[in-house]
C-alpha cells in the first residue's frame, strides 16, 4: 500500500483556466457489488476502494459513463490537480473526461460545489494489477485553480475513450498546491453513478477555451478523406487517385508555420473531399477565423471550397485505414474559397496575426462553440479535370472574438427560493462588460447583459439579482468579457 505524500511527476498534463463558476444539483446513486451489464456495480475484486489504495489493483464500474467515486478523506485539503493511473487492460475503458465537486454537507445528498472539469488523456500503456507499483509513465494529470477545501469530494468520469463494457481506473488522487495527496487508503469511499447533465449532448466537458492563434507543430494531425460513413485516415504514397501523399508533402506540413517553397504543403492524390483532423495542443478552442495559403505550383489543385467540423470526442490516431465516424462531428461552417493565383516559391514563416505575408485568403465566420478537435475538409478543387491532387500550403485557426483575457469571476450567489442569481467579478473602474451564460460549457451564445458598467470606485463588479436562465434547473456556467 502506498500513501501519497509527494506529488508524482506525470507524462501528460492538461492545464485549465477556470474563469467560469457553476452551480449544480446532482443525484448521486450508490452502487453495489455485482456483474450486471450497464448497471452501477462492480466485481468483488475490483471495488471503489481500489481507486485509492495506492497500488495497481483497479476500480471497475459496469455503469460506464458518469460513474466515479465519493471520498471522505481523513487528511483533507484544497485540491489543485487530479492525477489518475491507467488500469491493467482495455484502454477503451479509460476515462476521457472528469468532473470534480466538493461538499461540506452529506456526502450523498449534500449540495456539491463545482471545482473543475475537463478532458483527460491517459496513455495506452498499462499499469499492472494487484499490488504492483503505479508507474508515473502510465498516468495523466489535470491541473486547475482552487483554494477551497471540503469534507467530501465527488469525482465523476462523464465519458470514456471508447465503447467497452465498463469504466476502469487503477488509482485516483487529488493533490493540493504543496503536492500533498488528499486521498489515502482507508478513507471512506463510495462507488457511484451520477444523474444530471454533466455531459453536453455533443461531447465531453471541456476546459475554458483557448484564444488567439490556435495551431502549432505539436498538434496531432491526421490526413485523409471524408466519405459517407466517416473520415478515413490515409498514408504516405504516390498512387494516383488514392488516399495518400508524398513523404515530403504530408499533413504535418499544413501546420508547420510556413508557406511556399517545394514540399512546404499538404498534398493528397485522392483530390476531392480530402482534408485533415487536427487536435490542438492548446486544448478546447473556439474557432471563428481560418486563413489558407496557396502552395508553390499547380493552381488547379487549389481547394475551391471548405468545410469545418468540430468534436469533443477524444480523437486517438489509429493509423492508415482507421475510420473516424462522421456522427462524432458537428458542422461549424462551410463555403467557397477564392485563393489567389499567386504562388510562393520560397518557404516563408506565416508570422503573427493579422497576417500580411504571402498569397492567402482569410475567412471569418460566426461560432461560439468550443471543440477539442477539428475536421477540415476540401470538397472541391479549382479545376478537377486537370488537377491530379489537392494541395494547400498552410492553414491557421484563430479565435478572434475571445482573444482578450477574460475577467475572473470571484463569486456566484443563488437564491433557491426566488430562483435568482447574482455574479461578482474582478473589474477595471469604468470598463464595460458582457455577462454570458452557458448550459453546458459548449454553447456561449446567451448573454445575460451586454452593457454592464463597472463602478469607478471599486475593483469588483456585481450584476444581479437576475432570473436563473435555466429556470429551476441548478446547472449552468458564466463568463465575463470586456465589451
Image (cartoon, helix red, strand yellow):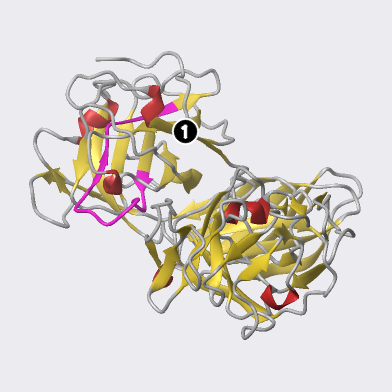
Q: Is residue 144 above or below residue 449?
A: above
Q: What residue is at 69 percent from the left and 54 percent from the top?
A: 263
Q: Nearer the viewer, residue 192 or 56?
A: 56
Neighbor class of circle 1 (other Cα within 10 Å; few <14, some 14-19, many 20+) is: many
Q: Residue 330, position in %: x, y?
A: 50, 72
Residue at image point 27% right, 57% down:
163
Q: Residue 473 sits in which quadrant?
A: bottom left
* Residue 319: x %, y % from top left: 40, 53
**Residue drawn 50% across the image and 28% down it:** 78
- Residue range (magenta): 156-174
Q: Is residue 299 visible?
A: yes
**Marker count (numbered):** 1
Whether residue 442 is visible, yes or no, is: no
Residue picked out by circle 1: 141
Q: Is residue 92 above or below residue 381?
A: above
For residue 306, above or below residue 7: below
The picture places residue 150, in percent across and down from the top left corner, at 44, 32
Foreground: 48 or 297?
A: 297
Quadrant of the image for the C terminus?
Answer: bottom right
Please state if 395 lies on the left or on the right of 327 as rendered. Answer: right
Q: Is residue 52 magenta?
A: no
Which secondary structure, mark 1? strand
Horizontal placement of 208 versus 261: left or right? left
Q: Position of residue 81 (x, y in %)?
A: 50, 31
Amino acid at each position: 500500500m502506498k500513501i501519497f505524500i509527494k506529488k508524482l511527476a506525470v507524462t501528460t498534463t492538461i492545464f485549465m483556466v477556470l474563469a467560469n463558476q457553476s452551480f449544480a444539483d446532482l443525484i448521486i446513486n450508490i452502487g453495489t457489488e455485482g456483474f450486471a451489464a450497464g448497471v452501477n456495480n462492480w466485481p468483488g475484486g475490483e471495488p471503489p476502494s481500489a481507486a485509492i489504495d495506492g497500488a495497481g489493483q483497479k476500480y471497475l464500474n459496469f455503469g460506464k459513463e458518469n460513474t466515479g467515486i465519493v471520498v471522505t478523506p481523513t487528511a483533507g485539503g484544497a485540491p489543485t490537480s487530479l492525477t489518475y493511473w491507467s488500469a491493467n487492460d482495455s484502454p477503451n475503458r479509460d476515462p476521457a473526461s472528469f468532473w470534480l465537486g466538493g461538499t461540506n454537507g452529506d456526502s450523498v445528498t449534500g449540495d456539491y460545489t463545482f471545482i473543475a472539469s475537463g478532458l483527460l488523456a491517459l496513455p495506452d500503456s498499462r499499469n499492472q494489477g494487484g499490488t504492483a507499483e503505479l508507474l508515473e509513465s502510465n498516468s495523466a494529470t489535470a491541473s486547475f485553480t482552487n483554494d477551497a477545501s471540503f469534507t467530501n469530494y465527488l469525482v465523476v468520469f462523464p465519458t470514456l475513450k471508447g465503447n467497452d463494457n465498463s469504466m476502469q481506473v487503477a488509482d485516483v488522487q487529488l493533490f493540493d498546491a504543496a503536492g500533498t495527496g488528499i486521498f489515502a487508503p482507508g478513507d471512506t469511499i463510495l462507488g457511484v453513478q451520477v444523474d444530471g447533465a454533466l455531459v453536453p449532448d455533443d461531447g465531453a466537458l471541456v476546459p475554458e477555451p483557448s484564444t488567439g492563434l490556435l495551431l502549432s507543430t505539436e498538434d496531432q494531425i491526421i490526413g485523409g478523406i471524408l466519405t459517407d460513413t466517416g473520415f478515413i485516415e490515409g498514408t504516405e504514397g504516390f498512387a494516383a487517385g488514392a488516399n495518400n501523399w508524398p513523404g515530403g508533402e504530408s499533413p504535418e506540413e499544413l501546420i508547420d508555420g510556413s508557406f511556399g517553397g517545394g514540399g512546404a504543403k499538404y498534398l493528397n492524390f485522392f483530390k476531392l473531399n480530402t482534408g485533415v483532423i487536427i487536435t490542438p495542443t492548446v486544448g478546447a478552442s473556439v474557432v471563428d477565423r481560418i486563413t489558407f495559403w496557396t502552395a508553390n505550383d499547380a493552381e488547379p489543385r487549389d481547394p475551391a471550397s471548405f468545410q469545418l467540423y468540430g468534436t469533443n470526442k477524444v480523437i486517438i490516431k489509429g493509423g492508415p485505414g482507421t475510420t473516424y465516424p462522421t456522427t462524432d462531428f458537428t458542422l461549424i461552417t462551410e463555403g467557397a474559397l477564392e485563393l489567389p493565383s499567386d504562388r510562393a516559391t520560397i518557404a516563408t514563416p506565416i508570422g503573427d496575426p493579422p497576417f500580411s505575408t504571402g498569397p492567402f485568403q482569410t475567412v471569418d465566420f460566426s461560432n461560439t462553440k468550443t471543440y477539442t478537435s477539428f475536421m477540415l475538409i476540401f470538397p472541391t478543387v479549382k479545376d478537377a479535370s486537370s488537377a491530379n491532387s489537392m494541395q494547400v500550403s498552410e492553414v491557421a485557426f484563430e479565435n478572434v472574438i475571445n482573444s482578450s483575457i477574460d475577467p475572473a469571476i470571484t463569486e456566484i450567489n443563488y437564491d433557491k427560493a426566488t430562483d435568482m442569481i447574482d455574479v461578482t467579478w474582478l473589474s477595471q473602474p469604468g470598463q464595460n462588460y458582457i455577462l454570458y451564460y452557458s448550459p453546458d460549457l459548449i454553447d456561449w451564445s446567451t448573454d445575460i447583459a451586454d452593457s454592464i458598467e463597472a463602478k469607478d470606485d471599486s475593483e469588483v463588479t456585481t450584476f444581479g439579482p437576475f432570473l436563473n436562465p435555466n429556470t429551476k434547473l441548478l446547472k449552468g456556467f458564466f463568463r465575463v468579457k470586456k465589451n
